[in-house]
Amino acid sequence: MPTTTLLKITFNGRVNIVQGVCIDIKLRCNGEVDCDDSSDEGAACSNILPLPTTYWNKMCPTPAPVIRMRARSLGVNNVIMNNNQIEITLFTDLTWIDSRINFTMLLVGTIYQLPDENLTELWRPQLFLDNGGYNNNLNIAKRTSLLENFYVRTNVTGWNSFHETREAIVNYGTDVEIHYETSYLYTFGCRFDFFSYPFDVQICELQFSLKKISGSSCQPVWNEVNAILSNRTSIPMYDVDQLRYRIENKKTLKIVVLLRRKYFSYLLTTFFPCIVLSLLGSLTMISFRLDNFQDRITVTLSLLIVVASLFSQVVATIPTSPSSKCVEIFFFYVILRLAFVFILHTLVDIIITREEMTKAKPVSKRKNLPNKIEPMRSERRGEPSEKNPAAWLSDLGNEIKNERLIPQKAIRVNRMGWILGFFCDFMFALVLSLFVLENKSGIVSHFTASQLYPFQEEGHGQ
């Protein structure tokens, strides 16, 4: 292998090794030893040239440095509805340029890790999560409970120069991108809208702002072009759409999360059973004789009790909020519907009873029965005879009862109630569906108005 004690510039851009041979300058500080004495690697291979004496890490590179964010969702961990919070693990990469710093030995397209001490020596933008709470911002500021990475990369070929008596490739700060990557579990607030529950769609936003340096005019701003990477994912209760973002006043970057609740289980356990119970209540109006009041009213009351019990169980599991929810409105309507059937049965029975009372006549006058009934031996046996009309009178009462004539008014009332009930069912289903669809479409349109960065698995991290 070649040996060297001094490196200096040659006309063809190679490293001249005294008492040895020349090696390509790109082989210096590439992480592999190419000289016996390791003079091409080692402590002299720092990628940052000594900072100017006027450099201060509390001062921005420019009055308004432009910061670009590349973020990727690593998964929505939890949705805490009662606390109006969402937990999401997010990878963020902040990129900026600092013209006050010169770099050395950077090859085009290659990533160079910076040591941890550079995190405290160099200026970097300070993120602030507006809706993240105190603990989130404290951890970000103190760099605790997060994974971080600091590196630089350039897309411009540097120029050959000397650094500490050695030849080196030098890049101006304007040609080098500085990257600060973090991975952190963010907990942020979200204003849930439960009107359409359990068909609700929730839109939540992580509001990142760049802190202004106190006592100076330095105010970093967001780049208009950012990369927010994600796939459509799913958690137990929600489907999560691709993340989007938008910029407000160049100072606030909002990463928008859209959650679509999975509602099929609610259909099977709540809505379909209630619809069946409501149909059973309506069938009592046509499946039983109108004069069979006891059976009609018993079935209706039993259905009411079942619906009320189901309602109490569902209310105990839904998120609490002062506003009404679709499922609560649905249950309230089903209870009103069965109550309407109950009232209709009662009204029909009242009409039948009054009609019978107005047409009733004394049985003795209709059948020319004697007013005086002499007791006979056959009376004890319960057998009808000419001298024992008491048993015959009992049979006559049963026959009259079994042949009760249903008044036409009761039939009309029952028929009108049945038609009115189904008309109300149709109108209620139509109006509630329109309200739910309008509410969901408004939320989705607000989400789609944000910018979508097409997800590309390839190239991540480049």
Image (tube, rainbow, N blue to C red):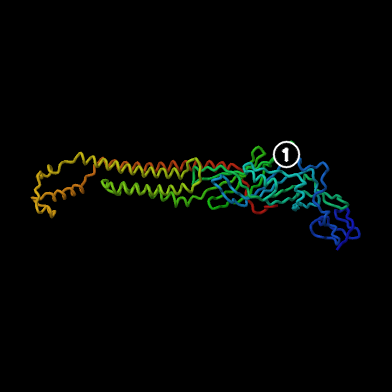
- Whether residue 38 sits left or right of residue 80 in the image: it is right
Q: Which residue is mark 1?
A: 213
Residue at the limit of the structure toward the right, as seen here: 19
Q: Which residue is rendered at x = 14% and y = 53% of the image?
A: 382
Q: Which residue is rendered at x = 16% and y = 48% of the image?
A: 396
Q: Secondary structure at mark 1?
A: loop
Residue 8 percent location from the top left of the image: 89, 53
Of residues 397 and 46, the one nearer the viewer is 397
- Tell me if mark 1 has few (under 14), some (14-19) or many (20+) residues whose alpha carbon lies within 10 angstroms of its own: some
Residue type at mark 1 is Ile
- Whether residue 420 sits left or right of residue 36 in the image: it is left
Residue 300 percent location from the top left of the image: 34, 47
Residue 72 percent location from the top left of the image: 64, 50
Above or below 29: residue 341: above
Above or below 283: residue 21: below
Quadrant of the frame with the N terminus: bottom right
- Numbered disc total: 1
Residue 354 percent location from the top left of the image: 23, 40
- Whether residue 259 sits left or right of residue 332 in the image: it is right
